Image (cartoon, helix red, strand yellow):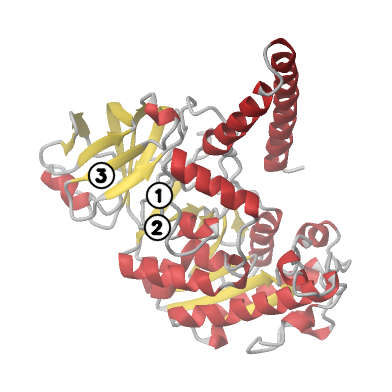
Amino acid sequence: MSRKQQLLKRHRRTKRIGLLIALVLLIVIGVLVAWWLPLVVAVLGWIAHEAWFADHLFYSPKDDYQYSFPPYTPQPKVHLSGEHLRLDEGVMLVDDATLVLALRVKSTWLGRFFDPVVELAGGENPDRQTFERGVNGLRYLNLSGQAQALSRGDLRLRGRFCRVFGEPVLWALEHPDYRRQRVMVIAPHADDAELAAYGLYSQADETWIVTLTAGEIEAEHYRQMGLTKVDAARLKGRLRTWDSIAVPRWAGVPEARCVQLGYFCLQLASMQAAPGVPAGSREADLSDTRLFRQLNPFALPGDADGAPTWNNLLADLRELLLRARPEVIVLPHPTLDPHPDHICAQAAVLEALQGLDWQPTTLLGYANHLHDNDRWPMGDSGDGIALPPAFDSVQPMQPYCLPMPLEQQRDKAMALGMMHDLQPPMPFKRRLRRLIQRLLAGRVPSTYGENEFFRKAVRRHELLWSIKHTPGNVSQRGEL
């Protein structure tokens, strides 16, 4: 069982106990006070839950985030005076460096009901970064893109429903311009590449998009059209296969460099456990990947028999790595992203690289899902992305932040809008929750689309993580 599944199980157990206690209290109120009062209290309690307590947050907002960064990372001296954040005299910053600022954030009493926000004002790139309601601990702001304002002494930090305090610590992490290199994005499912790295891959000198699975399961939306479970799954898989090949064309990636491997959703772990045994689709009644590989621009080793095996997946990846010779591989982060297909996708790339003649110079990890906080990145579309919750500082982390101008944000939103999996309407309960949160908690839905990923992914930053890579021996933990 994954860590996230364990957290969910514990959360649901606690919730069931809480509901049982609430039911007993309501019965007591009904007997001792008035029969109708429990109904009113129950409705008000449910509304309060949906407005303020429905987030999946598996840690206390009072917990300090704990990060360590690579040794010898520059730490320009900064001081917080009132709202103003100022560098020491004579300190210079590189414009495109990834800037991370650690300071303490404490919510006001209103910050328990409205999302606490730290506003970055005074520069050419005003920003907002949001934290947990009730936050009271060490947090890491992303100041990337604020170098000039900070150098001039113009940058101001304003807390909304919170205040910032303490002695701030700044890190300045410098990187090559990965946009000037050959980039390969590994997407476990269609839309993962766009969610994580549309800004990077749309600007890279040469981009390859490699999608591992057809993403055919959970096709209830298509069953509403009168299709059987099997037919709905096959239709969804074909649509997402098309998306994986066609949508990157919006960013200028040639069809000849977009590949769909057609393995089956949530079956990568079974394939890895028994590398030579086929793992067929859970819902599409298929044990042959070739239905979903027909749009590929060239043949791959797995096309010989279409068997959904780990050995075929490794052979396909090795062929693609030698053909594309990417300098930068973008793939799920080994510890931040808990989705089982994402974990296996990362492991497959690392295994395929072992002993290969071609080795990339850089691995960049992404997290489209998170263990501890299903709402991260918190805040609204267009806002910046603060660093995610992390509570293990043993392994150094090296963030890489790519600024996303408004025009690119819009293009990214349109790319996500083309993805069929993000198009179906939300269930009624989720719509009602969103309405309640908008009225009572001030949360504004994204103008780009109804799916939650439009809010999470269309931001003024794309945040990736450098993963240590020694040719022929790739680290499994992402340390530096």
- Residue 106 lies left or right of residue 246; in this view the side is left
Q: Secondary structure at mark 3?
A: strand
Q: Is residue 419 above or below residue 372?
A: below
The label number, if any, that marks residue 120 in the structure image: 3
> Of callouts 2 and 3, which one flags the residue occurring earlier in the amino acid sequence?
3
**How much space separates mark 1 and mark 3, taking CA atoms?**
12 Å
Q: Is residue 24 above or below residue 252?
A: above
Place residue 293 in its image quadrant.
bottom right
The label number, if any, that marks residue 235 in the structure image: none
Residue 473, visible in the rendered structure: yes
Residue 431 placement (x, y as % from top left): 58, 52
Label 2: which residue? 459
What's under tag 3, amino acid-wise? Answer: Leu
> Of callouts 1 and 2, which one flags the residue occurring earlier in the amino acid sequence?
1
Residue sitting at 31 percent across and 35 percent down? 160
What's under tag 2, amino acid-wise? Answer: Arg
Residue 451 placement (x, y as % from top left): 55, 60
Q: Quick one: which residue is furthest to the top in this view?
A: 32
Place residue 103 in its image quadrant.
top left
Label 1 CA crowd tier, 10 Å (few <14, some 14–19, many 20+): many
Q: Is residue 84 above or below residue 166?
A: below
Residue sitting at 49 percent across and 26 percent down? 63
Label 2 CA crowd tier, 10 Å (few <14, some 14–19, many 20+): many
The label number, if any, that marks residue 385 in the structure image: 1
Residue 344 placement (x, y as % from top left): 70, 58
Of residues 479 and 286, the one nearer the viewer is: 286
Of residues 93 and 357, the one nearer the viewer is: 93
